C-alpha cells in the first residue's frame, strides 16, 4: 500500500477552470458553411422518420410495451407532415 501523504496530494487538487459562457445575444446568424434549413429538407427528413417508424411497427407485436408510444409519435409526425405540405402548397 502507498503512503497516506501520496493520496492527500489528490485531495488538494484545485477544481478545473470554468468554461467561458457563450453570449447568445451576440449570435445572430448560422455559422458559415452550414445550409439554412428549408421546408423541403425538413419534409424529406420527416418522411424518412415516418418510414422508419412504420417499418418498426410492422415487426413490433401488438402487445409490445413501446407500441402505444410509437403509434402516438407516428400520428404526431404525420400531422406535422400535413402542415408542411399545406404550407408548401400555399407558397
Image: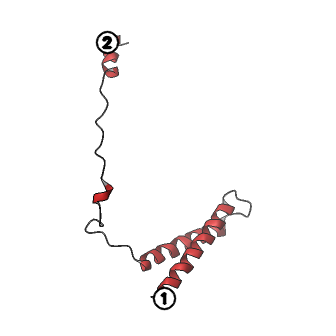
* Residue under the point 65% across and 70% down: 58
Going from N to C along the chain, the mark reached first, 2 or 1, is 2
> x, y (%) of residue 61?
71, 63
**CA gap, disc 2 and disc 1:** 74 Å
Q: Is residue 38 left or right of residue 34?
A: right
Q: Residue furthest front?
A: 25
Residue 69: in sight, yes or no? yes
- Residue 90 is tagged as 1
**Disc 2 versus disc 1: nearer the observer:** 1
> x, y (%) of residue 13?
30, 24
Q: Residues within 10 Å of mark 1 (few under 14, many from 20)?
A: few
- Residue 65 is tagged as none
Image quadrant holding the C terminus, namely bottom left
> Is 15 situated above or below 31?
above
SS class of the residue under badge 1? helix
SS class of the residue under badge 2? helix
The front one of 69 and 91 is: 91
* Residue under the point 61% across and 66% down: 73
* Residue under the point 27% across and 59% down: 26
- Residue 5 is tagged as 2
Amino acid at each position: 500500500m502507498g503512503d497516506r501523504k501520496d493520496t492527500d496530494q489528490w485531495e488538494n487538487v484545485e477544481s478545473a477552470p470554468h468554461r467561458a459562457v457563450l453570449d447568445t445575444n451576440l449570435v445572430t446568424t448560422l455559422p458559415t458553411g452550414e445550409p439554412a434549413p428549408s421546408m423541403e429538407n425538413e419534409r424529406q427528413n420527416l418522411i424518412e422518420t415516418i418510414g422508419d417508424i412504420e417499418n418498426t411497427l410492422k415487426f413490433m407485436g401488438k402487445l409490445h410495451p413501446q407500441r402505444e408510444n410509437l403509434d402516438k409519435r407516428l400520428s404526431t409526425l404525420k400531422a406535422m407532415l400535413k402542415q408542411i405540405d399545406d404550407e408548401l402548397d400555399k407558397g
